[in-house]
Amino acid sequence: MAQSGSDHQLWFTRRQGAVSGPYPSGLISRYLILGRLNLDDQVSQDQHTWSPISAFPELIPPEFLLPDDAEGREARLRARLREDERQTVNRREPEEGVIIGDQRRSDRRAPESPEFIQHRLQRERISQAEPLGMPPRSVPWALAGVAVVLVLGLLVLMGDGREPAVPEPDCRAAPAPGVNWSYCRKTGLDLSGVDLTGATLVSTDFMLAVLTGAQLAGADLSYADLRRSDLRQADLTGAKLVGTMLQEARLQGARFSGADLSYADLRGTPLEGVDLTGVPLGRAVWIDGRVCAEGSVGECL
């Protein structure tokens, strides 16, 4: 029988007979993105009852719920580049968030492609030369975003020949309508009332950010991290929030008319008084961990 899970529970993992852990729920999701675990690997809270990870929707990253098409593969590539935080100098450094257990052979990630290796090398070079006075990791994230866009552009040119949809991000740019902060780190910033109308904010890290009353109409927030952010009274009219992480966000009074919350993660987010009339919610992870049925609109079916 499948066990229940939450962000505060710890999980042991079993892969090819090797047991590791315990790890918090968020780390299980991260390991899935990085390829250290797959959906067939097993998890347990007590090391007695084991179930495949696929039995727990709350552990599955939103990107894994996307179809296996060009858009889905691109989303998973973005997620992996975003989550790949290993340093090239010290490859033996333990993963952050590991509480108990040594690193075993079965925990090692699968061989990586050249673009992932190049991404890590570039970030390491930049982080060693980061100028004084800059916000923590702002430069590495900015140029890591450039590397991601270049990689995605190369994949597009090798694929169906479409033009890259997102121009080069500028993480140092001031908040303004149409700004491109894709892949940038804006964790914990006070952005109350800023005008980001039509901004490109793909995979931007807004965790714990204060966006009260922010103008985000028409913004592309696909796969952005808005966990525990404050979006009260924000204008999200027509915003694209596909695959956006909104766990425990504050959304009271936010306007979602014409927005798209497909594949978004809303676990633990209070929705009392939030009007989602007409908002697509297909395959979104609902506040109680359920995955909404394809075609859900306005409510999780």
Image: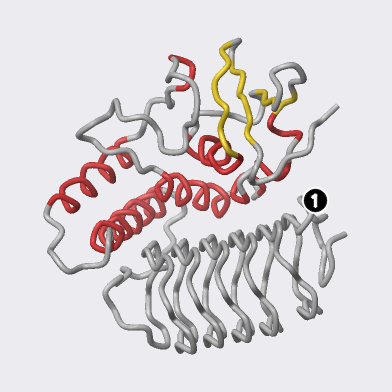
Q: Where does label 1 land, which residue?
A: 290
Residue at point 70%, 25% (across, down):
44
Q: Nearer the viewer, residue 226 or 35?
A: 226
Figure label count: 1
- Camera-side residue of 21 and 281: 21
Q: Locate residue 285, reporting x and y percent.
A: 72, 55
Q: Is residue 164 left or right of residue 121?
A: right
- The x and y percentages for residue 114 are 29, 36
> Looking at the image, which residue sits at the far top?
17
Q: Image check: 150 left or right of 243?
A: left
Amino acid residing under circle 1: Arg
Locate the C terminus by quadrant: bottom right
The relative height of residue 233 versus residue 288 in the rendered view (above or below) is below
Image spot of residue 262 (x, y percent): 69, 63
Q: Secondary structure at mark 1?
A: loop
Residue 90 sits in quarter: top left
Residue located 44% across and 16% down the image: 104
